[in-house]
Amino acid sequence: MSTTAAWSAVALLCVALLLSYTDRLIINLVVDPIRADLGLTDLEISLLQGAGFAVIFALAGLPSGRLADRVNRRNLITAGLSLWSVATIFCGLAVDFWTFLLARVAVGLGEAMLVPAASSLIIDSFSPRRRGLALGTFSLGATFGAGSSLFIGGVVLGWIEAGRFAATPGLAALEPWRQLMVLAGLPGLALVPLLLLVREPARRHSAGLVAISAVLARLISDNATVLRICLVKGALGVGDYALIAWLPTLLQRSHGMTPLQAGGLVGLSLTVSGVIASVAGGALSDRFAQHWGVRSRAALLLGAYLLALIGALLFLLAQTGQQTALAFAIWALGSVSGYVIGHVVMQESVPNEMRATTVALSLAVTALVGISLGPTLVPLVAEHGFGGEKGSLQAAMGTISLGAALLALVVIWRPASARLTELRKRSSG
């Protein structure tokens, strides 16, 4: 595959990832309207945000990864994109909790097909010295998607409430939040024919599909670095989704912001931090690899997770909406950079035939631990840990993210500090 074709594929896959995060997270902007319209509790809403999506996302991730290691990855991605886009539209047509839950399950099933196949495809499209930047660029889709689901979603919601789509057939009769969900699903369907133009690259150094037991054996080798990164992603995922799922609602309830203001502030914070983290994290890890070898990338993880810890502490201390958003931005800077660097470490630590399966296992941990628990823990901790009083929502979110960052540092400390020791010896020698 030529360099131009490879980067074109990365660009299209980045857009697909952007849309996946948009469709996954757009619900967070309209929590209160959905709750009022369907008569749901905060706990039921949190299940739609988290476990309703995450359980099937995790369970389907491993079979999707196995498929990506043996079938045409472009076609697998296209099928998943079509499914989750249609399912997002059906979220806007839900009549009760159960129909909404079924649609969210379908979103999770479709999105499970994307990242394992895309990561494997990108790795096979680039030389080792460019893989960090390529995967970092791909990861921009997650950043822009998470940000745009709130920022652009808030803008579109404002247009809907102003009657911009009043003459659109099929939309005018729907409540604003329903129109937003329907509109969110349409771009994915438009991307499908463009993705079909992507060429499937040849698999590099592949020995064929291997057993799950062989993958797990590989993950626990080399001081279990890859397995530790999987666990860390799950821990940080709890903090990520606790903050992302409830921050727009916190800004609206506690700081009097409109959905547009809350979505814009959170979206801007996440987008700026995420772009910096994705590009800088990938490029910096490539630079480390070029100078000190690929094993040196793991040393950067300590700095990333420490930055997330600082963000969590500042979140607990924040007094205004702007301070809260700034603390979240610092958290995101550490979390996203850690995700990008950890992703490259995992991909380079296993052979080609294990890469998509390894990514799928990582995503399964992130989904089952992070996405399932993060949103759901917030109302539970706010109610039972802080009495449900004023300020309990922020306290719960900050406490959860702080615990997640501390756990991440503890888990990664041994392999990362070992890499730091190696670097010091090389520098002094």
Image (cartoon, rainbow, N blue to C red):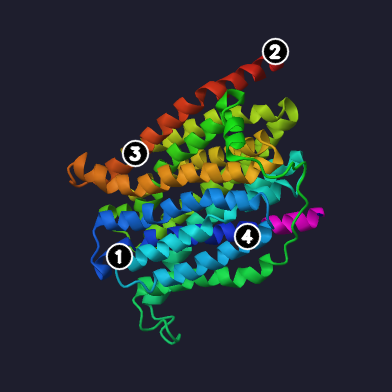
**Residue in view at x 60 percent, y 29 percent:** 298
Q: Amino acid at mark 1?
A: Phe
Which one is nearer the viewer's eye here, 109 or 339?
109
The structure residue drawn at horizontal position 62% and vertical position 25%, both measured from the top left corner, is 222
Residue 151 visible in the current orientation: no
Between marks 4 and 3 in the image, the one whose residue lies nearer the viewer? 4
Q: Are marks 1 and 4 in contact (CB under 8 Å)?
A: no
Which amino acid type corresponds to the residue marked 3 in the rendered image? Ile
Residue position for label 4 = 76
Tally of numbered tags: 4
User: Where is mark 3, residue-wise?
Assistant: 400
Separation of residues labelled 4 and 3 (CA atoms): 35 Å
From the image, state whether disc 3 or disc 2 is nearer to you: 3
Q: Is residue 355 left or right of residue 46?
A: right
**What percent of the width, then of the height, locates residue 425?**
67, 14
Element under disc 3 = helix
- Is the C-beta separation of discs 3 and 1 under 8 Å? no
Q: Mark 3 or 1, which is nearer the eye?
A: 1
| CA separation in Å, label 2 and label 1 | 61 Å
Q: CA distance from mark 3 to mark 1?
A: 26 Å
For the magenta stretch, what is the residue range? 2-10
Question: Pointer 2 and pointer 4: residues touching (CB < 8 Å)?
Answer: no
Q: Quadrant of residue 415?
A: top right
> In the rendered structure, which disc, 2 or 1, sits on the residue that comes first in sequence?
1
Residue 82 location (% of width, % of height): 56, 68
Report which residue position mark 1 lands on: 97
